[in-house]
Image (cartoon, helix red, strand yellow):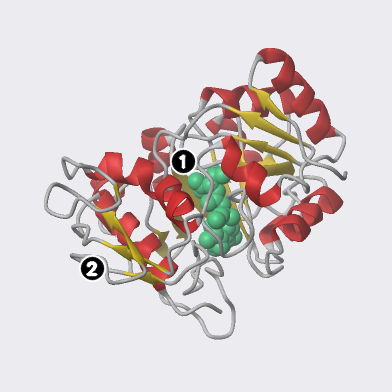
Amino acid sequence: MTGTAPIRSADPAAIAAAARLLRDSGLVAFPTETVYGLGADATDGPAVARIFAAKQRPSFNPLISHLAEASAAAAFADLNPKAEKLAEAFWPGPLTLVLPRRADCAIADIASAGLDTVALRVPAHPVAHALLRETGRPVAAPSANRSGRVSPTRAEHVAAELGTQVDMILDGGPCEIGLESTVVRLNASGACLLRPGGITRAEIEGVIGQLGEFEPSAAKPTAPGQLPSHYAPAQPVRMNAMTAQPGEVLLGFGPDVPGTVNLSETGDLAEAAANLFAALHQLGNSDAQAIAVAPVPDTGLGIAINDRLRRAAAPRT
Ligand code: TXA
Ligand code: MG
């Protein structure tokens, strides 16, 4: 489709129209509790291919398929007891499980980027839930930004990044968590963390015990999303800054480093997570030459925040 996609307030009529678009091979951006997703019917290979084209996403980077109910997961993947415990504890919510694909898995191979695993998530956002239920199919959805750029936490971020590429943007207001889901891989040899996110490592380990360390295999990129440069605003990013240098704007944290924009004046990590991407969009749209960022404690949700900031600050690929 050409032109700019309509942003529609996510009322029942808009959700029904969005579900029809998805069933007709369209692309719909929708809110989740983490970030906005760019959705297509996960069982429709050509529709999923349009996601990769719209985002300019490398075809080796697989997508998460979203389900309305946890009970649907077993139709697509082999769940082991640890996976069942995590699903029970955290679904619906900001957790993605990477699991072995079932032989009869209906999710298109392209959504798995040809790997023998599938990534599944049951989002908690009421609009996402209603959309998934009405669509009646798994919905593949990466974050609704161009590949490598800052993730969207508001409908306007999606319109600015991908407005001409999607058929509809469902507006459900700002995302509550603001950081992507935690990605955990589970297979016969154990469980490991592929991406820190909205649920902390400690919360995961509280349910299934200690996570193993992820060991990247040179032969096969099992965590292709772990690219060093990602979440990048237009300007370079400098971490652990106490003050702005000439030409810089400062992203503050807590009372000691107020900044041009502050992630959380009281130093609250959940508030900082919710504000992170909107602040990067705002400062990225300024005419500053660079963005300096105050130190954020590397504990709890701060681990996921620092993961995003490190990739935003990494040399661009
Ligand atoms: O919160 C979220 O997870 C959001 C919302 C929309 O649900 N989605 C999201 O998708 O962040 P995306 O595509 O931006 O990130 C998905 C991550 C990537 O790092 C990808 O490489 C990884 O999950 N992933 C997906 N399938 C995988 C698989 N089979 N094996 C390993 N990693 C996988
Ligand atoms: Mg993303």
At label 1, counting other C-alpha atoms closer than 10 Å, the crowd grade (few under 14, some 14-19, many 20 or more) is many
Q: Is residue 139 left or right of residue 266?
A: right
What residue do we see at 36% from left, 35% from top? Answer: 89
Q: Which quadrant of the rendered structure holds the N terminus?
A: top right
Amino acid type for the residue under numbered disc 2: Asn
Q: Residue at x 39, y 42 (%)?
A: 86
| Secondary structure under the numbered disc 1 in the rendered image | loop
Q: Position of residue 124 (x, y in %)?
A: 48, 30
- Image region (quadrant) for ligand 1: bottom right
Which residue is identified by label 1?
34
- Which residue is farthest bottom? 218
Query: Within 8 Å of ligand 1, the CB of disc 1?
Result: yes
250 relative to 182, above or below:
below
Q: Residue furthest top?
A: 12
**Where is residue 199, by image quadrant?**
top left
Residue 240 tag number = 2
- Mark 2: few/some/many CA within 10 Å (<14, 14-19, 20+): few
Query: What number of labels is visible?
Result: 2
Of circles 2 and 1, the one toward us is 2
